[in-house]
Amino acid sequence: MTDLFADSEPRRIGLGPGAVLLRGFANDKAEHLLEALQNVIAVAPFRNFVTPGGHTMSVAMSNCGNAGWVSDRSGYRYDRRDPSTQVPWPAMPDVFTDVARRAAAEAGFDGFAPDACLINRYEPGTRLTLHQDRNERNFGAPIVSVSLGLPAKFLFGGLTRTDKVLRLMLEHGDVAVWGGPSRLAFHGVDVLKDGVHPATGRCRINLTFREAL
Ligand code: MD6
Ligand code: FE
């Protein structure tokens, strides 16, 4: 039997201690994820949050699950309700939860039970500057990050802002799992290049799953 992947890129790429990129892990569920996403966005549309510093973020965001990540002039936090409507965030679709927990287990984090999914929409020219994810209650749980649509250059640094930064492309269906000693690593997304993807059109969608509450 010939091995189709023998001469191709590895499917599993270590990013650091506790951080791994699972190439194509969500490929077979991508369409189903995007279909479920439409129902979430119909209730909680994408919007551009304002940072505590008063800048409007270029990446548009929404959430589903028991808690959603929000930002305004008073700070970053998790909130059970959508601040634009005061209605609870839509429930997390089963296919979201299923992909997230299977990816976490594949990376060595059994029993991942996300209560929050932050949904990021990148259009050409938008970016996410280097940051740490530190608004969650339990840093013992990993973060699972699913990439859909246009490819983006991901920046992955260390525990201080000035550490050397690894750069790698995240493609449609890729899943990064991120925990343990890397849980508080600085990371970001470089300016999105223009393009059109058959599954999403002219954008990239990223789903990040967390145990937030
Ligand atoms: C993105 N991701 O890929 C942004 N955070 O669009 C994140 O900010 C992120 O991918 C924590 C863990 C994994 C991530
Ligand atoms: Fe992040």
Image: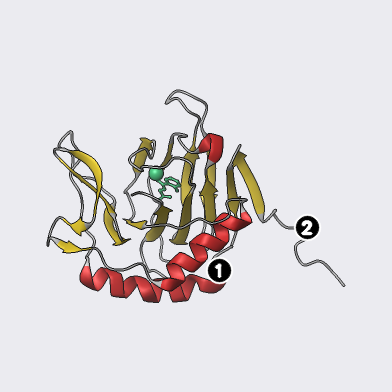
Location of residue 60 by image quarter: bottom left
Marker count (numbered): 2
Task: Give the number of the disc on residue 27.
Answer: 1
- Lower position in the chain sequence, tag 2 or tag 1: 2
Task: Give the number of the disc on residue 67.
Answer: none
Q: Nearer the viewer, residue 124 or 122?
A: 122
**Contact? badges 2 and 1 (CB < 8 Å):** no
Q: Is residue 165 above or below residue 39?
A: above
Disc nearest the viewer among 2 and 1: 1
Residue that mark 2 sits on? 7
- The residue located at (87%, 72%) in the rendering is 1
* Left or right of residue 160: residue 58: left
Question: In this orientation, does residue 151 appear?
Answer: no
Location of residue 42 by image quarter: bottom left
How far across and down, in percent of the image, does residue 121 sit?
A: 33, 58
How far across and down, in percent of the image, does residue 127 sit?
A: 34, 45
